[in-house]
Amino acid sequence: MGFRDLTCCVNETTRPWVDMYGIVGTQVLRVSADTGLWVIRNRFPPDFRAPTHLHTGEVHAFTIAGTWSYEEYDFVSTPGSYVHEQAGAVHTLVIGSAGAEIQFVVNGAYVNYNPDGTIIDVQDGRSVLRSYLEECTAQGIDAPEGILV
């Protein structure tokens, strides 16, 4: 097994930013077909609020810019902060007034809920990658290669 087999180095300039859902800037950096691990960067607009969601696996979040929090918890993540989320965590992402850029390392899927508790959808690395590549095409951006490994 060579160096290339063991290591993945991705420069952010090799992954285009696309607008997902018409509002959230997104870069998908890596999706593992074997483990279900996926790495994504998001640029959220000011005062954005995501649906309440549940994570099936743990998540690591690194705040690059701006501030954000979870409605259900008593913290505000600022630039340089690291947030760990346990599998099974249920929360509502709330972005601060200046917007935020966050890198997430996600294991498994997340389930988005309506306010009445019914399921909106279930997203995992493959579904997010599929949406990302579709948005690249729709926005006239060449789809990058080598994301799914």
Image: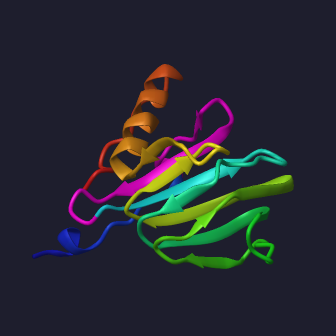
Which quarter of the figure is the N terminus placed in?
bottom left
Q: In this rendering, does residue 11 appear at all?
A: no
Magenta residue check for 70: no
Residue 8 falls left or right of residue 135: left
Horizontally, is 65 left or right of 98 in the view? left
**Where residue 22 sits in the image (x, y, percent)?**
65, 29
Which residue: 14% across, 75% down?
A: 2
Q: Name the residue rendered at 29%, 51% in the picture.
A: 148
Magenta stretch: give its range. Answer: 13-35
Establish if 139 lies above or below 84.
above
- Colour scheme shown: rainbow
Q: Can residue 92 be seen in this view?
A: yes
69 or 142: nearer the eye? 69
Name the spot of residue 23 as percent of width and height, x first.
Answer: 69, 35
Query: Which quarter of the figure has residue 66?
Result: bottom right
- What is the quadrant of the C terminus in the image? bottom left
Residue 35 picture quarter? bottom left
Check the image and report above or below for 11 versus 47: below
